[in-house]
Amino acid sequence: MQATTQYLNKGRSFICPYFLLISAQTIQVRISRMKTRRLGRNIIVTFILLGLCIGGYALYDRGRPAPIPMKQKLYDGVTYRRLIRIFPRPMIAHVLTIDTKTNGIEFLVTPPDTESETPLNARTTSQFLSEFNLQIAINGGGFSPWWSHSPADYYPHEGDPITPFGLTASNGNIYWMGDDTDVGTEPTLYIGRRNTLSFNNKPGRVYNAISGDRMLVLKGEIAPDLDDKELDPRTAVGINRNGRYLYLVVVDGRQPFYSEGATFVELAHFLINQGAFMGMSLDGGGSSTMVMEGDNGTSIILNSPIDNYIPGRERPVGIHLGIYVK
């Protein structure tokens, strides 16, 4: 029997039961500490990720107008409206209605910087407004040369020389004729010294003139053959039937979940809904910008421009349309 007991106990060690109890408690304490540490790490990681998300959104959303409809009188004869559409996709449009018969309202098309084949130096719309002490400004028509390959590879930079598209005049000086064969037929808005407005009907004496991309509205109807597929930021200008009211429209785009842009057909609808009888598109994409003068004389961007897919970044452009409100 003793031999059998010794055989059964062979290889075994005697363990005190109190030691087992103490060891179990120690293991539980260690497990509890590990869980606490793991929970702490998870909380820290969660806060870091949340901070990155909030910071990333704040960076993406910085300076953009809130997607809330609004209507505001900016000056006598100048009303601003922000129009919001959610379906079938988000779209934000900014509309300025100008009563040209209001005393003190005058217009300015970007004047030439030089007498050459590249008569204009590129500047942002905000710079244009500040340089000429304007109260309202939007980007104008197209220009060349232009390219945008990346945030580091683009043209023009501020101050680079460019050439406007189409007939262009400022304060009675026609400094660019465009293609002579197209004058009078390509989209051009003529603004007289006394704020008379007309499209494509060249007056005997041109005072201000700015050319666009294509006609959007013809006698209250959507112009034929407009694209209804491609979404982009857009800028447009229109007038009502008797030429008293000028409508400036900028649609934000290329910004998912905020505003994806508009087609040319949608842009034409916007103009008609404001009361436009005639209307044309100006340069769009990263050029689309609308600004006003702030209380301290600085520029306030009313829309959300997006140059090189960077929200809030203004593109230097060649031509602008400005408004004085005295």
Image (cartoon, rainbow, N blue to C red):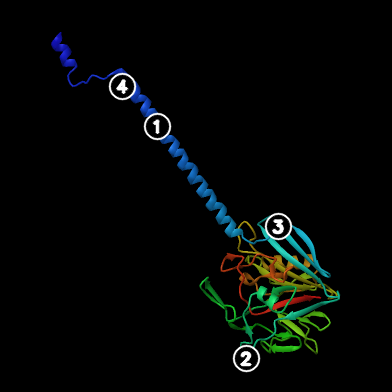
Q: Quadrant of residue 10?
A: top left
Q: Nearer the viewer, mark 1 or mark 4?
A: 4
> Which mark is first along the chain, 1 or 3?
1
Q: Nearer the viewer, mark 2 or mark 3?
A: 2
- Which quarter of the image is occupied by the C terminus? bottom right
The amino acid on which the numbered mark 4 sits, given as a three-letter code, is Phe
The amino acid on which the numbered mark 1 sits, given as a three-letter code, is Ile
The amino acid on which the numbered mark 3 sits, given as a three-letter code, is Arg
In three-dimensional space, the C-alpha distance between marks 3 and 1, rounded to whole angstroms, equals 55 Å
> Which mark is first along the chain, 2 or 4?
4
Name the residue located 72 percent from the left edge and 58 percent from the top edge. Answer: 84
Query: What residue does disc 4 label?
Result: 19
Query: What residue does disc 3 label?
Result: 85
Dots 3, 1 in contact, CB < 8 A: no
Q: Is residue 75 left or right of residue 251?
A: right
Query: Residue 230: x and y, percent?
Result: 62, 66
> Which mark is first along the chain, 3 or 2?
3
Disc ID at residue 31: 1
Query: What residue does disc 2 label?
Result: 116
Q: Secondary structure at mark 2?
A: loop
Q: Is residue 93 left or right of residue 1?
A: right
